Image (tube, rainbow, N blue to C red):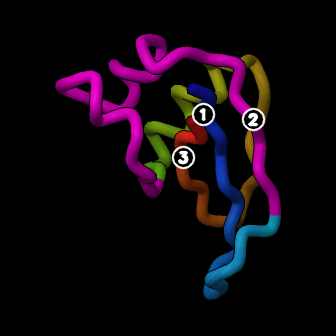
Amino acid sequence: MKHLILVVPHGSDSISAEIELNVTAAELQSVMGWENENDCIYDYKLTVQQISSIERLISQSLPKNVELYLSCDE
């Protein structure tokens, strides 16, 4: 199972980019507040705090001035 960041411009319904994350669901669990193992399979609109935590986790900056979603691709 791999996790992706979906980049969506404000006011759009289209994904402009996908960023594959090289992290496990276990590493994302505390960032996302997941309570069980099935929580990782849904799409989540990321908060500013979650974005910052993911950036620290992956040691990379994510795009700014867009909406970011965490998605799972099995």
Q: Is residue 8 left or right of residue 72?
A: right
What count of labels does the image hold?
3
**Element on which disc 3 rests:** strand
Tell me which numbered mark, 3 or 2, is placed earlier along the sequence.
Answer: 2
**SS assignment at label 2:** strand
In the rendered image, residue 63, in percent from the top left (x then y), is placed at 77, 51
Q: Is residue 41 above or below residue 44?
A: above
Q: Position of residue 27 (x, y in %)?
A: 47, 13
Circle 3 residue: 71
Q: Are marks 2 and 1 in contact (CB under 8 Å)?
A: yes
Q: Which residue is mark 2?
A: 20
Instruction: Please say if the residues under marks 3 and 1 sit with CB atoms less than 8 Å apart.
Output: yes
Residue stretch in magenta: 17-45
Q: Earlier in the sequence, mark 2 or mark 1?
A: 1
Circle 1 is placed at which residue position? 3
Q: Amino acid at mark 2?
A: Glu
| Residue 53 picture location, percent across and down | 52, 27
Q: Quadrant of residue 13?
A: bottom right
Tag 1: amino acid: His
Q: Alpha-carbon neighbours of circle 1 within 10 Å: few (<14), some, or many (≥20)?
A: many
